Image (cartoon, rainbow, N blue to C red):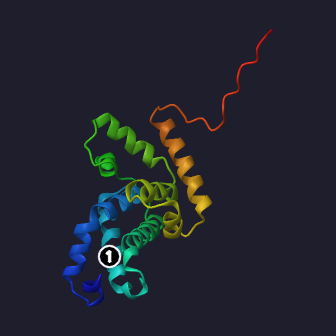
């Protein structure tokens, strides 16, 4: 943090080494394109470099970087609507190399979600940010994030053929006596 404030170029490399994979995963899930995600991460790191003085609490560096990355990716998504997707989307989220059919199904399921919903899921699931920080990063209310996460998970379960979660309790059968 202090190296960034002092303007040391190697500090950007350190940030990229420490947080780059997660930042890239968030950008990729939002943009659905490897090259655009790389550009978003680069733009986010440059923005962080230029605006480091606005970060008052050094302990908030990681969520602050995710917020910047999410905003940059959403801005890029509005400008360009790419349909090209890398085949390693599922591995970026899970850290494992899934079977090809599972990977393709996952890619299709994620691609079927609206960009803001993908961003909320990426920030919460990939970056492991709490709902409050996801809301702050996306500039929406916590209730909006909770709704996006709930709806996004439900859509992913349906798209991946999993049984939908029950939101309501099943009523006990009436006894016929």
Q: Residue furthest front?
A: 177
Pointer 1 residue: 45
Of the pair 8 and 27, the residue shown nearer to us: 8
Q: Residue furthest left?
A: 10
Q: Position of residue 40 (x, y in %)?
A: 35, 69
Looking at the rendering, which quadrant does residue 123 occupy? bottom left
Q: Name the residue at 40% across, 59% down.
A: 31
Q: Quadrant of the N terminus?
A: bottom left
Q: Residue furthest right?
A: 177
Q: Residue furthest bottom?
A: 6
Q: Name the residue at 38% across, 55% down.
A: 126
Q: Position of residue 61 (x, y in %)?
A: 37, 75
Could you tell me which secondary element the residue under label 1 belongs to? helix
On screen, 16 above or below 21? below
Looking at the rendering, which quadrant does residue 24 occupy? bottom left
Q: Quadrant of the C terminus?
A: top right
Disc 1 residue crowd, few under 14, some 14–19, many 20+, Cα 10 Å: many
| Image label count | 1
Q: Position of residue 93 (x, y in %)?
A: 34, 50
On screen, 10 above or below 177? below
Of the pair 75 and 93, the residue shown nearer to us: 93
Q: Name the residue at 44% across, 70% down.
A: 67
Q: Position of residue 147 (x, y in %)?
A: 59, 53
Of the pair 169 and 6, the residue shown nearer to us: 169
Q: Name the residue at 32% across, 61% down.
A: 22
């Amino acid at each position: 943090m202090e190296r960034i404030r002092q303007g040391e170029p190697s500090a950007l490399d350190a940030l990229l080494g420490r947080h780059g994979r997660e930042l890239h995963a968030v950008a990729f899930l939002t943009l659905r394109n490897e090259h655009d995600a790389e550009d978003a991460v680069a733009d986010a790191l440059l923005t962080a470099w230029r605006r480091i003085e606005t970060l008052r609490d050094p302990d908030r560096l990681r969520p602050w970087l995710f917020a910047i990355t999410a905003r940059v990716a959403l801005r890029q998504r509005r400008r360009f609507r790419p349909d090209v997707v890398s085949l390693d989307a599922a591995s970026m989220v899970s850290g494992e190399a899934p079977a090809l059919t599972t990977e393709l199904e996952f890619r299709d399921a994620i691609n079927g979600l609206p960009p803001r919903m993908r961003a909320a899921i990426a920030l919460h699931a990939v970056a492991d940010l709490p709902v409050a920080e996801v809301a702050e990063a996306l500039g929406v209310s916590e209730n909006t994030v909770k709704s996006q996460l709930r709806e996004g998970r439900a859509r992913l379960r349906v798209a991946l053929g999993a049984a939908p979660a029950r939101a309501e309790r099943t009523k006990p059968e009436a006894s016929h006596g």
